[in-house]
Image (spheres, rainbow, N blue to C red):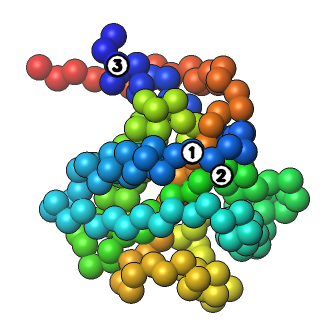
Amino acid sequence: MNSTLDTIRNRRSVRSFKPEQIADAEIAAIIEAGTYAPSGRGDQSWYFTVIQNTGLLHELSEAVKRIYASLDNPFLQSQGKNEKYHLFYHAPTVILVSGNEAALLPQLDCAVSVQNMLLAAESLHIGSCWISGLDLLAATGEGRPVLNTLSIPPGYKPYFSVALGFKNNENLKAAPRKENIIHFIR
Ligand SMILES: Cc1cc2nc3c(=O)[nH]c(=O)nc-3n(C[C@H](O)[C@H](O)[C@H](O)COP(=O)(O)O)c2cc1C
């Protein structure tokens, strides 16, 4: 197995982090990997906001949880109402990925950029988790005040975020892979 395939296979969503901060050089390498993702029409429509302020991360988490608690979806509702749930699992660094709404496929651009960053983090032995829900802040009046503190450029919409930090647990197991999902036509 080559190292890229190992990285793909070994990456897991990490939801428990050590409090130590990761280095700026590691963050730069992870974001650079994000910028080398493919993008619709080559638009590179992503914009990255690195957040390490614990108070702001708590505020964002609480704002998204309030929205989750009001939704019909039972899974999200229970997360929203769970006092112990922190949207970013207390990760010391969170990278918010916003997309230029004038691009052809900004949400997909941001998604593939996130995946590149998750793999880059794994290759650096840094734990990561894809975090959604931030898009809801833009959709509700309630989420606007906290979003406005983030200096996201006009015309960009927050889509996803990546929680990053050193792993508390190295032994996360992948769920069994689904079978019968391939059909060759030759
Ligand atoms: C589009 C997308 C959104 C996700 N959103 C969240 C999220 O908000 N919170 C979270 O803890 N995990 C989130 N995840 C991670 C998935 O739960 C995780 O990838 C899945 O359970 C499989 O586990 P693995 O990543 O360890 O293989 C998301 C993953 C994707 C692809």
Q: Nearer the viewer, mark 2 or mark 3?
A: 2
Question: In this rendering, does residue 139 appear at all?
Answer: no
The Cα atoms of the two marked residues, 2 and 3, are separated by 27 Å
Q: Residue at x 47, y 38 (%)?
A: 121
In the image, 166 versus 73, the foreground residue is 166
The residue where tag 2 is placed is 92
Q: Nearer the viewer, residue 116 or 183?
A: 116
For disc 3, the neighbor class at 10 Å (few under 14, some 14 to 19, many from 20) is: few
Q: Position of residue 160 (x, y in %)?
A: 50, 60
- Disc nearest the viewer among 1 and 3: 1
Local secondary structure at mark 2? loop
Residue 87: image quadrant is bottom right
> Which residue in the protein does label 1 denote?
22
Report the front residue among 19 and 130: 19
Q: Amino acid at mark 3?
A: Ser
Q: Are marks 2 and 1 in contact (CB under 8 Å)?
A: yes
Q: Residue at x 86, y 53 (%)?
A: 84
Q: Nearer the viewer, mark 2 or mark 1?
A: 1
Q: Which image quadrant: the N terminus?
A: top left
Check disc 2 and give the amino acid type: Pro
Residue at the farthest right position: 83
Q: Amino acid at mark 1?
A: Ile
**How far apart are the two marked residues, 1 and 3, measured between alpha carbons?**
22 Å
- Residue extending furthest toward the left: 186
- N-terminal-most mark, 1 or 3: 3
Q: Is residue 27 above or below residue 43?
A: above
Helix, strand or loop for disc 3: helix
